[in-house]
Image (cartoon, rainbow, N blue to C red):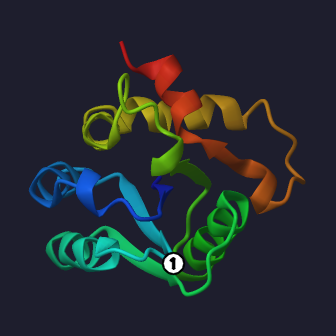
Amino acid sequence: MRIGIIIIFHDNEVEIDANHCIQCLKHANKLEICLVDNNSMDNTQEVLKEIKEECHNISLVNIKKFKSDAAAVRAGARFMINNFDLNHLGYVSVNSLNKEIFGLNNMIKALQENQARITDHCVSNSSLQKTNRTIFQNIFPVMDCFEKVVE
């Protein structure tokens, strides 16, 4: 089973270490990752394109007019639902990360290192959820998952 992760970016060019992201995400084989550029005014989209070109499990969605984080997550979720057969979707907004405690590089590394445990966590929690929920209700915040799986 593969899990989809939606990562929302908005003007984060300076924070993105493309080489680090590529090295970590190439090894995140159990995850399908959707990078959503929420109308960045800097070169965020170009950096995300570079990452996408190097990694087989990365998709890129570009939102041309700035949206709220919730709307950007829905756009990423629609793309993932239409293009992949995923049972679980998680999301994180880079701008909501506490950069002093858990910045983008640490989050990307944690995705790669904990993908099996994240999958196990999603499977165990799915048995507790109602079976008739819509896909948008089943999207989990990635940071909540890290609090439970990262040591």
Q: Report which quarter residue 126 is drawn in.
A: top right
Choose between 136 and 65: the one closer to the eye: 65
Q: Quarter of the image for the C terminus: give it.
A: top left
User: Residue at horizontal 65%, vertical 59%?
Assistant: 69
Image coords of residue 106 (percent x, y): 28, 34
Which residue reaches farthest top? 151
Which residue reaches farthest front? 41
Number of marks in picture: 1
Image coords of residue 37 (percent x, y): 46, 72
Choose between 137 and 117: the one closer to the eye: 137
Secondary structure under badge 1?
A: loop
Q: Amino acid at mark 1?
A: Asn
Image coords of residue 19 (percent x, y): 9, 57
Choose between 68 and 79: the one closer to the eye: 68
User: Residue at horizontal 47%, vertical 79%?
Assistant: 61
User: Residue at horizontal 25%, vertical 33%?
Assistant: 113
Image: 105 above or below 34:
above
Image: 43 above or below 6:
below
Image: 74 above or below 49:
above
Choose between 8 and 86: the one closer to the eye: 8
- Left or right of 2? Residue 63 is right
Name the residue that disc number 1 marks.
39
- Left or right of 138? Residue 98 is left
